[in-house]
Image (tube, helix red, strand yellow):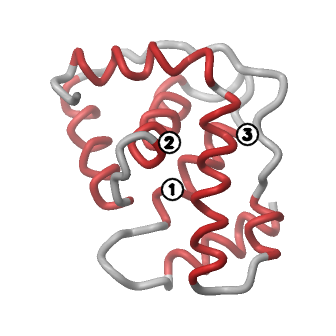
Amino acid sequence: MAAYEELQSYTLTHGGSTFIHQHVVDAWAAQNADSNTKAIALTFGLVGLYLRIERAYTGRQVQQVHMMLSRRSKHWPSFPLPQERGAVTAITVMAAPPGPERDRAIDDWCASVWNAFRDSHPAVVELLKQHGIN
């Protein structure tokens, strides 16, 4: 948890228009989801990971999709929680030097978690299609 909090501080003070912080929030939400996690939290985490890894969206663009989805629906699917959630963690990311290396580590984390949820990929894509996001 301490590494995640440090990483949040790093990304919130990162600057720039890409809002890299969103990717950290999404990776954490999916990687740490459990049976008590609200469906919207896991859905938005997986949507964010898909948009980052498969579509190269910036954090700001992901945030805009999240806002649009929240206005359109109040019912969210449930996704199976895989046993393994990816080898890269917030601790791994914080071990990288600040700057471009850490930023790449954030993308590696997102890819690692997204890959762990491979069985949910079709459902995430279908959800976005239902809302007009291809």
Q: Check if mark 1's residue and mark 2's residue have beta carbons within 8 Å.
A: yes
Q: Secondary structure at mark 2?
A: helix
Q: Are marks 1 and 3 in contact (CB under 8 Å)?
A: no
Q: Nearer the viewer, residue 40 or 133?
A: 133
Provide residue 94's location: percent of width, then percent of height: 76, 73
What secondary structure is marked by label 3?
A: loop
Amino acid type at mark 2: Leu
**Residue 23: mark:** 1
Depth order, front residue of 82/70: 82
Residue density around tag 2, few if under 14, some if 14–19, many if 20 or more, within 10 Å: many
Label 3: how many Cα within 10 Å (few below 14, some 14–19, many 20+): few
Tag nearer the camera, 3 or 2: 2
Alpha carbons under labels 3 and 2: distance apart: 14 Å
Determine the image quadrant of residue 92: bottom right
Please, is residue 14 above or below residue 43 in the view? below
Horizontal side of 14 relative to 29 (left or right) equals left
Who comes first in sequence, dot 1 or dot 2? 1
- The alpha-carbon separation of the residues under discs 1 and 2 comes to 7 Å
Q: Is residue 91 left or right of residue 98?
A: right
Q: List x then y, in percent, for residue 70.
A: 28, 34
Residue type at tag 3: Asn
Q: Quadrant of residue 35?
A: top right
- Which sits earlier in the primary sequence, circle 1 or circle 3? 1
Q: Is residue 133 above or below residue 73?
A: below
Mark number displayed over residue 12 = none
The residue at which mark 2 appears reads as 49
Q: Identify the image quadrant of residue 25.
A: bottom right
Residue 64 is left or right of residue 80, and the answer is left
The answer to which of 4 and 97 lies nearer the viewer is: 97
* Mark 3, residue position: 32
Q: What amino acid is found at the position of numbered circle 1 in the picture?
A: His
State the residue at coordinates (74%, 27%): 34
